[in-house]
């Protein structure tokens, strides 16, 4: 059952990155869209994420619940030392979620309040994934120091370091990239399509640069990232697969095959997560001095893991078909209707 | 304010905020389903308008409920890491099932909100029902987790170790049923009275009477039924608390001395120094009867409990009184409603009758907040009754005072925003729905 639980945790994280990430990305794109086009972007985006955005964010909750039920020591360790970035991320979640629905459900749509909602929405769409990335980076950065004796070394430098922050920016650019690819398929006007393609190109470049920064920062912080990723077959294969799928992605886009492009984008991001995740498995947190917290040893008692696994399996029997039907109804049926 | 008090206040604030949205999230889908059903059956467009107007409100509340719930699942760890480290594997079962229920709720809500004119109408109606059922289920499940903190079970506590963990036993602890029953009814009472009150106000002001009186009728029915049942389930809750948490019961009742023929203390100011109540009305024997079905039975007072294990008496006592008074007023309103419905139809549009419901608008939510104060403050100084003290659970990070200020600010702003939006919804009813 431990395997089942770990698989669910991995899937929840990947799916949150793909679906929730594309949601964040939509806001990031709005952030970087010129004022004249904002309105159109927003409309496309709303059609794309309106019905499903609530469900997309459930993957985060599932991941957190799996962590605190199945791996309570890991959860409490992260909660203590990454309190501040978690807090900022939560503020982002609050601001973003409420601004998004307020702007749609406000009965009076006057310019001033709409502008306020838009502002809150776009800023928090950047801040939230930035800090999610920082949190993920910090977990493996080796900067969390249970022996720390000053406030700064325990609660600030655990996440405020070059590596974590560059992972944060990398995450932001990937989210934006995902969303751009996704929105290309949603847009109906040729103009909009071209706009999103340009955005996707820019964000792809940004992701490259940020990815490079991550490697540089890793060297600065003495993290052997290059060795982690290129030093074992699976991670290396995953990276190569990611690169190939990126090339294929641009080919499919130039051929106008928007749906296949989405698959490649999702595949590429999954491969990136896999290449890092594989090397680290089963370790979830690397502490200062190299001590590790592992999914295989720092888990809850077996009985709990068994029950959690069963609950997840039964739950997914209900959730997955319903979720597929939701995506299907609002994607495919829509296509016919328009 | 020190960090420990700040952490407790922040937890209380976040939960007190979230519970409002969760009550609405549990109950409004039921109201919408009724009105939607009436629309499908009668084709009277007013019912469609009511359903749509409500569903917009619900979307606003749902988003706020979802984000504040997400906050909570992190805050448990941010504020009480030591508690979660040990409790997570034990009381986590309802949380994992709740995750499933939330997920289904979120999916169904997507169908419901965006499904007008897209699906078979009965399928669309059914998705609304699913939102309601999974909302209520998740409410029951979280409350089961809270009940475990009041009545820990499903493990053996040996030398500070938590052994032989059984998550299912932990979920079905002694308190889960009474708490879940009382909470589910409370959600109907609170949301029902709030919604009924707002529509009553509009009827009273003669605005869109057709729309508002139909909406009022749906809400008030549930509110009245639940309000009449609530004191009975409260009695079950009180008996259950007396059995497992004598300290909480004693504080609730401000009973300082262990005694037979224990009196029910109504009102008054508990004087913890002299161990007596000032200005209170005491009905001899009634407390013994309420807790043990027997006027003579001895009831444990605070003197039976070491001072270091006693909860704050005054807060618990006041909160309990507020809940009971509010409950009694709402029960009375519920009874009057049924009299009106069966015998005195003319009352229904009388000013005094509408005013009664207008005044009762906030009472349900006041009772909910008070009731949770009883449960949570009454459990102090324990975070897990009898096992772990709240003070041992708190995060080692200093500076929680500042995060408390931050949360207070955020929740305050959000509350204002929600009120503002709701006001705009109501203001727009004539333009949108009255033709
Ligand atoms: C509309 C709301 C409402 C109303 C009218 C009442 N209650 Fe209540 N009460 C709650 C809403 C609530 C609550 C907020 O839902 C609580 C908090 C925890 C829980 O399970 O329910 C609660 C807790 C609670 C507890 C503590 C249970 C525990 O700690 O385990 C007791 C003893 C009572 N109630 C008793 C009563 C009585 C005797 C009432 C008589 C009128 C009453 N309640 C009306
Ligand atoms: C939504 C309804 C709830 C409300 C309004 C509420 C209210 C409160 C209040 C007032 C406190 C502070 C008590 C004090 O410090 O004196 C508190 C503490 C706490 N509550 Fe609740 N509570 C609710 C439900 C829950 C649930 C469902 C859980 C968990 C399953 C929970 C977990 C906690 C924890 C961990 C604390 C901190 C430790 C403590 O002070 O005992 N609460 N809550
Ligand atoms: C008595 C206490 C509680 C009740 C009755 C309750 C009930 C609910 C309900 C009905 C919802 C759906 C939101 C809506 O429809 O508006 C919700 C949302 C949520 N609650 Fe609570 N809750 C309680 C306490 C808690 C606690 C203590 C936590 C976390 C540890 C929590 C976590 C969540 C989460 C994560 C969501 C968001 C799920 C979503 O996106 O739909 N809740 N809660």
Image (cartoon, coloured by chain):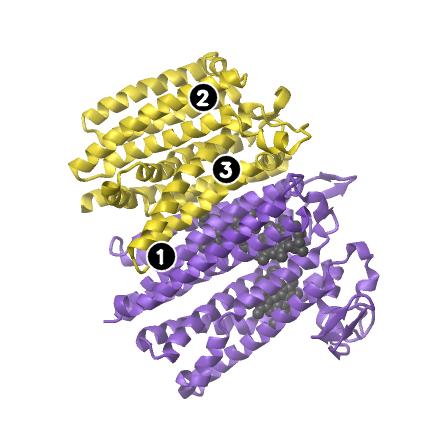
Chain colours: A yellow, B purple
Q: Residue furthest left?
A: A190
Give coordinates of residue B115: x percent, y percent.
29, 53
Q: Which residue is mark 3?
A: A63
Q: Tell me the mark number nearer the camera, choosing from 3 and 1.
A: 3
Q: CA distance from mark 3 to mark 2?
A: 25 Å
Of residues A303 and B215, which is closer to you in this image?
B215
Location of residue B164 (image quadrant): top right
Residue shown at 39% from the left, 26% from the top:
A270
Q: CA distance from mark 3 to mark 1?
A: 29 Å
**Mark before the other along the chain sequence, 3 or 2:** 3
Q: Is residue B280 left or right of residue A50?
A: right
Determine whether the residue tagged by mark 1 lies in a helix, strand or loop: helix
Residue shown at 83% from the left, 69% from the top:
B274
Cβ of mark 2 under 8 Å from ligand 3: the answer is: no
Determine whether the residue tagged by mark 3 lies in a helix, strand or loop: helix
Location of residue B270 (image quadrant): bottom right
Question: Is there one chain holding both mark 3 and mark 1?
Answer: no
Q: Can residue B105 be seen at all in this image of the molecule?
A: yes
Q: Which residue is mark 2?
A: A214
Give the answer, above or below, for where A189 lies relative to B98: above
Report if the CB atoms under discs 3 and 1 are less than 8 Å apart: no
Chain letter for mark 1: B
**Rendering quadrant holding ligand 1:** bottom right
Residue shown at 31% from the left, 75% from the top:
B208
Question: Is there one chain holding both mark 3 and mark 2?
Answer: yes
For label 2, the crowd category at 10 Å Cα-Cα, with few meaning under 14, some 14 to 19 and many 20 or more, is many
């Amino acid at each position: 059952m431990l395997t089942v639980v770990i698989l669910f945790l991995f899937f929840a994280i990947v799916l949150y990155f793909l679906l929730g990430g594309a949601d964040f990305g939509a806001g990031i794109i709005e952030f970087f869209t010129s004022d004249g086009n904002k309105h159109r972007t927003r409309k496309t985006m709303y059609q794309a994420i309106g019905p499903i955005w609530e469900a997309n964010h459930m993957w985060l909750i599932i991941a957190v619940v799996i962590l605190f039920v199945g791996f309570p020591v890991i959860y409490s360790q992260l909660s203590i030392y990454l309190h501040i970035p978690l807090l900022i991320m939560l503020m982002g979640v609050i601001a973003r979620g409420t601004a998004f629905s307020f702007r749609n459900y406000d009965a009076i749509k006057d310019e001033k309040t709409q502008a306020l909602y838009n502002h809150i929405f776009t800023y928090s769409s950047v801040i939230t994934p930035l800090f999610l990335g920082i949190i993920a980076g910090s977990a493996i950065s080796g900067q969390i120091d249970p022996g720390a004796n000053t406030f700064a070394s325990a609660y600030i430098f655990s996440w405020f370091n070059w590596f974590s922050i560059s992972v944060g920016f990398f995450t932001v650019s990937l989210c934006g990239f995902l969303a751009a690819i996704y929105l290309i398929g949603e847009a109906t006007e040729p103009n909009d399509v071209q706009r999103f393609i340009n955005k996707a190109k820019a964000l792809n470049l940004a992701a490259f640069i940020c990815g490079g920064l991550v490697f540089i920062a890793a060297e600065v912080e003495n993290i052997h990232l290059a060795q982690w990723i290129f030093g074992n077959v699976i991670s290396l294969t995953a990276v190569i697969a990611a690169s190939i799928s990126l090339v294929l992605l641009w080919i499919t886009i130039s051929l106008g095959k928007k749906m296949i492009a989405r698959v490649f984008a999702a595949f590429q991001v999954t491969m990136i997560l896999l290449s890092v995740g594989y090397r680290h498995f089963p370790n979830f947190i690397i502490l200062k001095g190299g001590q590790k917290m592992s999914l295989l040893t720092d888990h809850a008692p077996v009985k709990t893991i068994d029950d959690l696994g069963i609950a997840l399996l039964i739950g997914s029997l209900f959730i997955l078909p319903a979720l597929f039907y939701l995506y299907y109804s609002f994607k495919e049926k829509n296509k016919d209707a328009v | 304010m020190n960090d420990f008090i700040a952490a407790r206040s922040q937890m209380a604030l976040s939960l007190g905020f979230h519970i409002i949205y969760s009550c609405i999230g549990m109950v409004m889908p039921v109201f919408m389903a009724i009105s939607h059903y009436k629309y499908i059956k009668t084709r009277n467009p007013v019912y469609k308008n009511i359903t749509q107007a409500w569903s917009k409100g619900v979307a606003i509340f749902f988003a706020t409920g979802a984000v504040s719930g997400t906050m909570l699942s992190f805050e448990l760890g941010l504020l009480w890491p030591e508690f979660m480290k040990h409790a997570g594997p034990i009381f986590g079962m309802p949380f994992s099932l709740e995750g499933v229920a939330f997920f289904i709720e979120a999916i169904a809500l997507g169908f419901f909100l965006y499904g007008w004119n897209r699906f078979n109408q009965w399928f669309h109606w059914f998705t609304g029902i699913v939102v309601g059922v999974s909302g209520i289920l998740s409410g029951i499940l979280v409350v089961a987790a809270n009940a475990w903190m009041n009545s820990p079970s499903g493990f053996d506590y040996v030398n500070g170790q938590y052994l032989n963990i059984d998550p299912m036993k932990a979920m079905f602890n002694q308190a889960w049923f009474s708490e879940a029953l009382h909470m589910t009814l409370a959600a109907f009472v609170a949301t029902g009275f709030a919604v009924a009150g707002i529509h009553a106000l509009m009827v009273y002001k003669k605005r869109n009477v057709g729309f508002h009186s139909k909406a009022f009728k749906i809400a008030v029915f549930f509110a009245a039924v639940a309000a009449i049942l609530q004191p009975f389930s409260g009695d079950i809750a009180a008996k259950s608390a007396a059995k497992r948490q004598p300290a909480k019961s004693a504080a609730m009742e401000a009973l300082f001395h262990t005694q037979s023929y224990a009196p029910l203390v109504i009102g008054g100011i508990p004087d913890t120094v002299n161990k007596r109540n000032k200005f209170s009305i005491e009905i001899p024997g009634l407390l013994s009867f309420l807790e043990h079905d027997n006027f003579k039975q001895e009831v444990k007072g605070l003197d039976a409990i070491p001072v270091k294990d006693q909860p704050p008496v005054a807060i618990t006592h006041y909160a309990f009184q507020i809940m009971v008074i509010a409950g009694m007023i709402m029960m009375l309103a519920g009874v009057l409603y049924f009299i009106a419905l069966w015998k005195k139809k003319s009352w229904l549009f009388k000013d005094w009758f509408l005013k009664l419901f207008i005044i009762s608008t906030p009472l349900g939510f006041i009772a909910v907040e008070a009731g949770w104060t009883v449960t949570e403050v009454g459990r102090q100084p324990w975070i897990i009754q009898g096992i772990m003290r709240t003070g041992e659970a708190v995060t080692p990070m200093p500076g929680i005072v500042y995060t408390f200020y931050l949360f207070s600010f955020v929740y305050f702003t959000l509350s204002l925003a929600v009120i503002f939006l709701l006001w705009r919804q109501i203001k727009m009813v004539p333009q949108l729905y009255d033709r």
